[in-house]
Image (tube, rainbow, N blue to C red):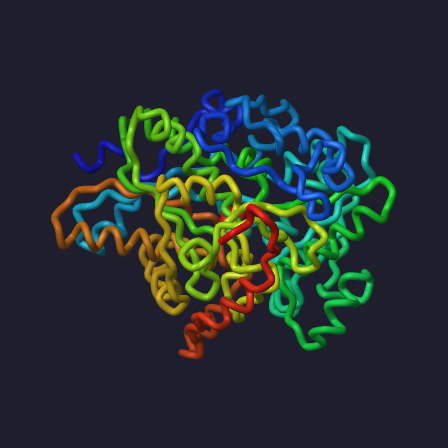
């Protein structure tokens, strides 16, 4: 019986999705629009086009069309590294002695090492189509910057990356990969922007944050002719591109009549989770099927589990629009958790709305337990996971162990977003027993909440 389902389920090329799925079209309560921080009115397409590429603005604002065509050029690029495998974790199931069936969708099979390439190639394509010279961005752990460098070199675009200082120092090889693909990489905060200089003045010893790097990248994009800013997570358009993950998964599972009971993903800004769950969530919203969705976040940066649902700035420098989301406050700088990609203070407004509507759950996990799960997974399933992805592994193992107690034969699906080859400083700390867990106190959080803008209608 067991072996009826292969270890890896691949799709044929002709089974790959030709359209992205836009979950917002099917949501009853739409995610709140981005607001202009000065007027507190919804951002217009024209305002957004000063910062973002035109066609991406259209996607950002589109909450009507459930399906959006994937341009041929992007489909071609996807075919170089997709479909990504859907793996049945037989070995892990056996080791855990669980009656649960565990599947993971593995997005680490490309040089950037994560799912970020799915959106990077789309964003670079639209920038090129618009005739731009280049794009600017921030990167935390480095995966997004790497993915964008690859995408930009494919389309011959200039790429300027602002990299959170702590990662720039901890991950010199990530930086070199980006430079190999032709990007320029600047540690953030830097002296090369106004906002960077201001932040450095206030916090001279800061190790940087994503919010801060975003402010710098936006400033450079808006002050240089022919440049726009692109973002690797959080935005609606990014969740749209990442729906390729969920669409492939759903097609693969349908082929073998597999129906997941629980779907788990790590949540930084929400793009991989939003992409993985999209088609399943669509069915749930329409009442066609039921699934349990679990977002997993670090206890050191608990946007969903301890944050406020309010309009807040997307960046530390407070230059970006306001987004309604679960947030810890744009001034919140988490302790140096090693899952750099999960250190963002906010969360996708789409996922925030779904969570607020009770359609999704969230859990927060501590990083030592995450690395225990990562080590176990590496030893049993062979893949060395990224620390971010390991949050999902930890929650999936916990679910499988619960099934062992209750005897339930649940089907668990989780997103394995990437590999951890550039995270060996973190693994080293773990191996040397030098890893600690810092959970922010209520007072720490209060400082962050105090920075959330106050205006009528933004009570939290
Ligand atoms: C960026 C990243 C994440 C978190 O980002 P989301 O937008 O929440 O998906 C998770 N895993 C990996 C490997 C990443 O690079």
Position of residue 63 measured from the top left corner of the image (x, y, whole percent): 55, 28
| Number of on-image labels | 0
Residue 240: percent from left, percent from top: 54, 33
Residue 219 drawn at (x, y percent): 78, 52
The residue shown at (78%, 30%) is 130
Q: Is the residue 224 above or below the residue 442 in the image?
A: above
Q: Nearer the viewer, residue 149 or 271?
A: 271
The residue lying toward the viewer, choosing from 332 and 267, is 332
Name above or below for residue 388 compared with residue 90: below
- Residue at the right extreme of this rendering: 225
Left or right relative to 428: residue 153: right
Between 423 and 131, the residue placed more toward the observer is 131
Where is residue 174, by image quadrant? bottom right
| Res 114 visible | no
Determine if residue 236 is in view. Answer: yes
Quarter-of-image position of residue 27 = top left
In this rendering, position of residue 297 left or right of residue 166: left
Percent x, y for residue 368? 38, 69
Question: In the picture, which quadrant includes the N terminus?
Answer: top left
Residue occupying the point 40% across, 78% down: 433
Q: Which residue is painted at 43% across and 75% down in the image?
A: 436
* Residue at 34 percent of width and 53 percent of height: 381
Judging depth in this view, the residue of 309 and 278 nearest the camera is: 309
- Considering only vertical position in the picture, is 76 above or below 331? above
Along the horizontal axis of the image, is 137 left or right of 264? Answer: right
């Amino acid at each position: 019986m067991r072996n009826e389902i292969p270890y890896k389920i691949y799709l044929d090329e002709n089974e790959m999705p030709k359209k992205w799925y836009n979950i917002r079209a099917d949501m009853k309560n739409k995610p709140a629009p981005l607001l202009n921080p000065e007027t507190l009115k919804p951002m217009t397409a024209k305002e957004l086009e000063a910062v973002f590429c035109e066609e991406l603005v259209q996607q950002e604002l589109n909450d009507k069309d459930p399906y959006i065509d994937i341009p041929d050029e992007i489909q071609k690029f996807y075919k170089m590294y997709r479909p990504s495998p859907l793996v049945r974790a037989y070995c892990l199931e056996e080791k855990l002695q669980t009656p649960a069936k565990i599947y993971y969708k593995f997005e680490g099979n490309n040089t950037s090492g994560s799912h970020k390439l799915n959106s990077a190639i789309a964003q670079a394509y639209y920038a090129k189509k618009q005739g731009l010279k280049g794009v600017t961005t921030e990167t935390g752990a480095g995966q997004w910057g790497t993915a964008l460098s690859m995408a930009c070199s494919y389309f011959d675009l200039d790429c300027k990356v602002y990299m959170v200082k702590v990662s720039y120092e901890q991950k010199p090889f990530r930086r070199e990969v980006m430079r190999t693909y032709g990007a320029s990489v600047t540690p953030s905060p830097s002296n090369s922007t106004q906002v960077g200089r201001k932040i450095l003045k206030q916090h001279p010893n800061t190790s940087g944050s994503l919010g801060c790097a975003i402010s710098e990248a936006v400033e450079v994009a808006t002050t240089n002719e022919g440049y726009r800013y692109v973002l690797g997570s959080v935005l609606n358009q990014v969740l749209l591109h990442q729906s390729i993950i969920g669409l492939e998964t759903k097609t693969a599972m349908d082929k073998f009549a597999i129906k997941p009971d629980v779907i788990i993903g790590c949540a930084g800004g929400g793009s991989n989770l939003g992409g993985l769950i999209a088609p399943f969530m669509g069915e749930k919203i329409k009442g066609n099927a039921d699934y349990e969705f679990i977002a997993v976040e670090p206890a050191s940066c608990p946007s969903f589990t301890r944050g406020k649902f309010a309009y807040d700035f997307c960046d530390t420098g407070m230059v970006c629009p306001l987004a309604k989301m679960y947030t810890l406050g744009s001034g919140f700088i988490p302790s140096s958790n090693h899952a750099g990609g999960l250190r963002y203070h906010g969360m996708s407004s789409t996922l925030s709305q779904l969570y607020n509507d009770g359609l999704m759950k969230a859990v927060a996990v501590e990083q030592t337990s995450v690395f225990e799960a990562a080590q176990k997974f590496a030893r049993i399933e062979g893949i060395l996971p990224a620390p971010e992805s390991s949050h999902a592994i930890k929650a999936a193992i916990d679910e499988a162990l619960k099934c062992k107690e209750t005897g339930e034969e649940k089907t668990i699906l989780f997103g394995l977003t990437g590999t951890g080859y550039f995270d060996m400083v973190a693994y080293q700390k773990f191996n040397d027993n030098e890893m600690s867990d810092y959970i922010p106190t209520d007072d720490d959080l209060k400082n962050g909440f105090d920075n959330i803008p106050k205006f009528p209608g933004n009570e939290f």
